[in-house]
Amino acid sequence: MNPVTLPQDKPVLRVMPMPTDANIHGDVFGGWIMAQVDIAGAIPAARRANGRVATIAVTSFLFKNPVFVGDLLSFHARVIKTGTTSVTVEVEVYAERMRLETEVVKVTEATLVYVATLPAGPPQGRIPERAARRQTHLPAGPPQGRISERAARRQTHLPAGPPQGRIPERAARRQTG
């Protein structure tokens, strides 16, 4: 078997799991690794979108080897696809096991999809083109793109003020009666 080496590119995140991140046997929880992968994937996605992003899908996630307390994890992420409003990122995780000799093991690989969002949270529209990204940030003003147009139409049909429904009415009845 060929020994695994760390990729030449710089990792977007490096972290060492602590005992609180593991079960009683020292195996790191998969959910903790998934959270770190999500953070690592969001970094290049936010750079590509020139702003905030939110995870919209995890299209694949494979745990190849266990992770132990004390392993030094390197998260390597790269954008593999840019859509109109989304960015797909591939994340690979390597563990450096520093026992008697340092051993490098690929422990996880995942593909995640992020969508660009406005500061308030809804999708903001198109991801800027590569050349435009180098020159400026996303344009100020109203959101652009299909998703934002639908959101704008919905907002014109919504009544002003807080939503009225059964739950607030029941609460008001309990307070008065």
Image (cartoon, grey):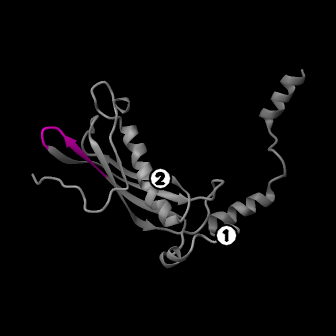
Question: Badge 2 is on which residue?
Answer: 57
Residue at image point 50% right, 75% down: 134
Q: Nearer the viewer, residue 100 or 104?
A: 100
Q: Quadrant of residue 31?
A: top left
* Location of residue 124 (image quadrant): bottom right
Tag 1's secondary structure?
A: loop
Relative image position of residue 67 (x, y in whole percent): 27, 39
Where is residue 44? Give x, y as percent.
Answer: 44, 61
Location of mark 1 (residue): 140
Q: Which residues are magenta?
A: 93-101
Residue located farthest toward the bottom when viewing the structure as drawn: 131
Q: Are marks 2 and 1 in contact (CB under 8 Å)?
A: no
Q: Please, what is the dominant secondary structure of the magenta stretch? A: strand
Q: What kind of residue is marked 1?
A: Ala
Residue 64's disc number: none
The answer to whether 76 is drawn above or below residue 32 in the figure is below
Count of all numbered marks drawn on residues in the image: 2
> Quick check: is 59 in the magenta stretch?
no
Q: Is residue 152 above or below residue 65?
A: below
Crowd rating for badge 2 (residues with CA inside 10 Å; few <14, some 14–19, many 20+): few
Q: Secondary structure at mark 2?
A: strand
Q: Is residue 154 left or right of residue 10?
A: right
Q: Look at 81% across and 44% down and name the residue there.
A: 162
**Picture quadrant of residue 43:** bottom left
From the viewer's perspective, is 152 left or right of 77? right
| Residue drawn at x 12%, y 38% as measured from the top left | 100
Name the amino acid, label 2: Ala
Percent from the top left, x then y, of residue 137?
57, 70
